[in-house]
Amino acid sequence: MRERSSKDRAVPERSQNGGESGVTDIAFSSARQLARLIRAKEIGCLELLEHYLARVARHNPKLNAIIATRLPAARTAAREADGALRKRGTKLGPLHGVPMTVKESFDVAGLPTTWGLPEFKRHGARTHALVVERLLAAGANVFGKTNVPVMLADWQSFNPVYGTTNNPWDVQRTPGGSSGGSAAALAAGLTGLEYGSDIGASIRNPAHYCGVFGHKPTYQIVSPRGQHLGDAVAVADIAAVGPLARSAADLEIALRATAGPDPIDGAGWTLALRAPKWSSPRGLRVAVMLTHATAEVDASVQAPIQTLARFLAKQGAKVSERARPAFDPDEAHKVYIQLLRFATSGRQPDEQYNRFMQGKGSIAADDFSYYAQFVRGTTMAPREWARLNERRHQMRLAWAEFFRDWDVLLCPTAATAAFPHMQEGERWERMMSVNGTPQPSTTQMFWAGYSGMCFLPSTVAPVGLTKEGLPVGVQIVGPQYGDLLTIRFAQLIEREYYAFVAPPGY
């Protein structure tokens, strides 16, 4: 009897309404399944790594998702992981032997951390980011890094150092950003797990565009230490770091492995995330927000989310399309954009900052275009920031009241499915078609900030395809520190309704 190849060992994933996705390659299995196969000695750690590397060699040239590797170290780690399996009594981590990649912005010793800037091309990290250390401690084998936009500041992933990353569902379209390489690599079966960052849907947006799962954690439950540019160490407002995966179960494994206090800033606290007790939709209280006048959502994205809501209602969930936290969403968007732009203002070149300072006086008080708010946020005085921050915290408490009555809020991640590459001009000048009407690409950041600026966790889960065959994800928003609730809700969707589907041709 011939030994089965690694391709033969795949475990089919479930798709909509209990079907199967048709996945036949082990590379598309979840990280949890891969770890189980390794523990059962059905596949070796080095064998699995080489299988992924063969796929990277075959598919990555047309995607440009993985842009840096540490293969000698990864192969050594795989051999050591195989050796540990042969030793009795060895304690194995939950990700033992699973090959994975991380976003380029995380320090990985020996690899450059550029954030897409040519001047940092030779900036080789001396140590691992804390998240990377914790993933390695959990047994993962980090073999490379994935592409990002310049300064992590786009919903596309292209830069002058590594070039453009393409979406595996359609290489003429973006995979999203700024964790675009992360989502593209997962969707194409080039890696077992991923880790990204999110201040403006940079985990959520690529997960939606590429049809994978992503989790933006509650602010500061996962330390970003080592996910900074150059010598910077300060923690940015709103920003979070979190996992992306082909299975919602993997999100929980990765979050548990990386969340918790760091040795300095977390020396005086512990993290205790409560897991929900429900196991079915029956009795769940689900608010649904399909679109909003501030950032209209295309019908092709609304429809799959509404279909999911109807399914949940039929399964016994209480579903409302009217329930909202008690504040004006339009005001929330204005507060978010200005807080966001203030949070990232320190990264901007002096030339751009000085230009904004000189031009801010010519912006009309009633101008709330993205550019106007960008300038205001970048140049605001501390007194103005304090006023907006106070309003943000009032909204945060309104969210807490909302979640007394509702378990989750379901909403879009973006206004459309993945759009064609648009790399000319400023982001706010790039237009996309939403229900036949042009909309600035930056307008849809409403869906990032509505919950994100208030520190809330959000999980994105795939829920269907558009008529064009592009993935659509739903954003699952939960209460502060309700990370396991939103992840478990994504697991419920995955088990009962729709799971990861591999793009054609991979």
Image (spheres, rainbow, N blue to C red):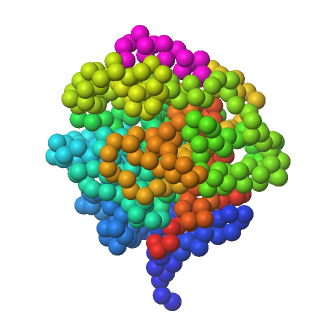
Q: Is residue 379 visible from the viewing direction of this image? A: no
User: As rendered, which of 501 and 291 lies closer to the eye?
Assistant: 291
Q: How many marks?
A: 0
Residue 208 as seen in the image, left or right of residue 354: right
Residue 209 as seen in the image, left or right of residue 478: left
x%, y% of residue 267?
A: 43, 23
Find the magenta span and give its range. 380-396
Q: Is residue 283 visible from the viewing direction of this image? A: yes
Residue 498 as seen in the image, left or right of residue 163: right
Residue 410 as seen in the image, left or right of residue 431: right
User: As rendered, which of 426 and 476 lies closer to the eye?
Assistant: 426
Q: Which residue is rendered at x = 39% and y = 32% of the image? A: 371
x%, y% of residue 309?
A: 73, 49
In the rendered image, the vertical position of residue 247 relative to residue 386, given as above or below = below
Is residue 390 part of the magenta span, yes or no? yes
Q: Which residue is rendered at x = 74% and y = 40% of the image? A: 321
User: As rendered, which of 377 and 472 lies closer to the eye?
Assistant: 377
User: As rendered, which of 243 and 461 lies closer to the eye?
Assistant: 461
Taking the view exactly as shown, the residue that stands out farthest to the top is 383
Q: Quadrant of residue 383?
A: top left
x%, y% of residue 40?
A: 53, 66
Q: Quadrant of residue 497?
A: bottom right
x%, y% of residue 119?
A: 17, 42
Main SS, magenta region, reads helix
Q: Which residue is rendered at x = 54% and y = 21% of the image? A: 392
In the rendered image, the vertical position of residue 265 relative to residue 205, given as above or below = above
Is residue 33 part of the magenta span, yes or no? no
